[in-house]
Amino acid sequence: MKQRFCLKIEYDGTNYCGWQRQVDKPTIQAIIEDSLKPLNGERPVTVIGAGRTDSGVHAREQVAHFDLETQLASATIARALNATLPPDIRIRECQQVADNFHARFDAIRRCYKYQILTQPSVFERHFAWYPAYQFDEELLQSCADLLLGEHDFTRLCKASAESTNKICYIYASYWEKTSNKLVYTITANRFLHSMVRMLVGSMTEVSRHKYPLTAFKNLLGKNGDTMQVYTAPAKGLILWAVEYKENTL
């Protein structure tokens, strides 16, 4: 009898073409599915993630589910996977869940963080963007404040985004400063393709006084054409957490 399992996964996306399996390209989903095959008699196993991170994007906590006909305990499955996965992908947790649990459709909130270095760092260069110019931090936060609530992000996602519905609800949006970084945190019910990177890239252009704050505000809709949309590099983006209803996990 098949059982459904949930994984919490962390990964360094530097060497991968995103989460979703692609033909002849290394992806996180494909690597994990291949590692599960020996536990399923070499038969294919489909792993469904909570979100499809882009090429070069990282995850502190990606959530995924899969079905497996096995008597193995969850902890044993986690150990078996970690024994074969490359060092830049790690299973943090594995647990059995209800048969109707769905990692993507049951998620109610997702949180991303974007890291910008204020000074170059050898040790953090793969996980943060170093643009080598100064920002007006008050303007960054003013941009972030405008995003709270429900907005149409048609202008702030890739045209190839699958969903025709481009409306998202933003629960949290703020910048924080550390000793060597500016860190942007955004939490929403859903995200569109490249949305966070476009938000960060465009906010930084406003903070450099290249566009007024009103121009950024006008991007929140289908007809905002008062400024060019910029896309920040993938390496600074981290899927930080996925939230589910209480007792779902």
Image (cartoon, helix red, strand yellow):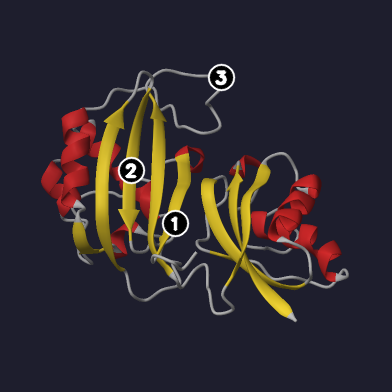
Could you tell which of marks 1 and 2 lies nearer the N-terminus?
Answer: 2
| Cα separation between marks 1 and 3 | 29 Å
Q: Residue at x 26, y 47 (%)?
A: 173
Q: Residue at x 54, y 79 (%)?
A: 100
Q: Nearer the viewer, mark 2 or mark 3?
A: 2
Q: Which mark is residue 202?
A: none
Please, what secondary structure does the residue beneath circle 1 have?
strand
Question: On screen, 25 above or below 150?
Answer: above
| Cα separation between marks 2 and 3 | 23 Å
Question: On screen, 176 above or below 193?
Answer: above
Can you give x and y, in whole percent of width and height, for residue 249 in the image?
Answer: 50, 64
- Asked if labels 3 and 2 touch by Cβ distance under 8 angstroms, the answer is no
Q: Residue at x 77, y 62 (%)?
A: 36
- Res. 19 in view: no
Could you tell which of marks 1 and 3 lies nearer the N-terminus?
Answer: 3
41 relative position to 210: left or right: right
Please, what secondary structure does the residue beneath circle 2 have?
strand
Please, what secondary structure does the residue beneath circle 3 have?
loop
Q: To which residue does mark 1 refer? A: 242
Q: To which residue does mark 3 refer? A: 122
The disc labelled 2 sits on which kind of residue?
Thr
Quadrant containing the N terminus is bottom right
How crowded pointer 3 is (Cα within 10 Å; few <14, some 14-19, many 20+) is rated as few
How crowded pointer 2 is (Cα within 10 Å; few <14, some 14-19, many 20+) is rated as some
Could you tell which of marks 2 and 3 lies nearer the N-terminus?
Answer: 3
Q: Which mark is residue 185?
A: 2
Can you give x and y, in whole percent of width and height, for residue 205 in the image?
Answer: 27, 37
The disc labelled 1 sits on which kind of residue?
Val
- Asked if labels 2 and 1 touch by Cβ distance under 8 angstroms, the answer is no
| Cα separation between marks 1 and 2 | 13 Å
Q: Looking at the image, which residue sits at the far left?
A: 214
